[in-house]
């Protein structure tokens, strides 16, 4: 495996792990704050990011590369509002999309069409996840400070996320 590509894939392993731990911290904050629906949503997101990380680990190993399991900084674990929580979600997804696009660009530069092909799954996944994050943040912006709106958002979050996901397909 090309060393530059191997390095980029190892970096990506770290970003997926980081996103997983960030979403776990967000789930825990929501759980503690009484937003059970939001907590469930982020527990699931955290698990998905772990799956994304594992998929990369296996791929690098299958291709004869060397995987480095990274040390991680502590994630942000307290939030002033639901808006801040979901802004953090969107920022994280936009960041990861940028990194994936960079890998795609380098694969083309270095003519590694195998990794390029493998990374297409991540491109599609990021499109969906960014769309979900944007939709949820839009809804929260409409709700504003309304507490009963937050209650309904917490109750319906998985339904709203599934609708945003479908619209994207
Ligand atoms: Fe790994 O899917 Fe988003 O970040």
Image (cartoon, grey):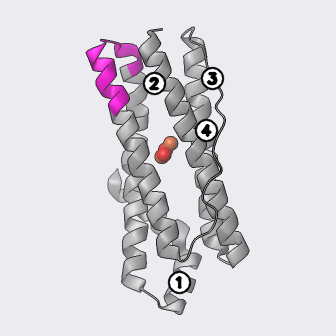
Q: Which residue is mark 2?
A: 8
Which element is circle 4 on? helix
Q: Which residue is mark 3?
A: 68
Q: Residue at x 43, y 68 (%)?
A: 136
How many other residues sit within 10 Å of disc 2, few (<14), some (14-19) or many (≥20)? some
Residue 113 painted magenta: yes
Q: In the picture shown, does residue 123 fall above or below 27?
A: above
Depth order, front residue of 134/156: 134
Kindly report the distance in space between the C-alpha atoms of the residues bearing marks 3 and 4: 16 Å
Query: Mark 3–mark 4 contact, CB under 8 Å?
Result: no
Is residue 121 shown to the viewer in this render? yes
Residue 165 place in picture, x, y as percent? 41, 56
Number of the front mark, 1 or 3: 3
Kindly report the distance in space between the C-alpha atoms of the residues bearing marks 1 and 2: 39 Å
Q: Earlier in the sequence, mark 3 or mark 4?
A: 4
Q: Quadrant of residue 25?
A: bottom right
Task: Give the magenta-colored segment's residue range.
Answer: 102-115
Q: Residue furthest right?
A: 32
Number of the front mark, 3 or 4: 3
Q: Earlier in the sequence, mark 1 or mark 2?
A: 2
Q: Which residue is mark 1?
A: 150
Q: Residue at x 54, y 66 (%)?
A: 158
Q: Which residue is mark 4?
A: 51
How many other residues sit within 10 Å of disc 1, few (<14), some (14-19) or many (≥20)? some
């Amino acid at each position: 495996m090309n060393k530059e590509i191997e390095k980029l894939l190892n970096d990506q392993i770290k970003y997926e792990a980081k996103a997983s731990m960030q979403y776990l911290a967000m789930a825990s904050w929501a759980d503690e704050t009484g937003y059970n629906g939001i907590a469930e949503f982020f527990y699931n997101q955290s698990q998905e990011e772990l799956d994304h990380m594992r998929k990369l680990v296996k791929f690098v190993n299958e291709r004869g590369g060397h995987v480095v399991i990274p040390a991680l900084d502590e994630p942000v674990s307290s939030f002033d509002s639901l808006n801040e929580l979901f802004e953090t979600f969107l920022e994280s997804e936009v960041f990861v999309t940028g990194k994936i696009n960079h890998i795609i660009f380098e694969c083309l530069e270095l003519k590694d069409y195998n990794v390029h092909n493998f990374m297409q799954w991540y491109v599609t996944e990021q499109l969906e996840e960014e769309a979900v994050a944007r939709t949820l943040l839009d809804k929260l912006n409409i709700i504003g400070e309304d507490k009963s709106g937050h209650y309904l958002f917490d109750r319906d979050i998985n339904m709203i996320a599934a609708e945003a996901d479908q619209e994207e397909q």
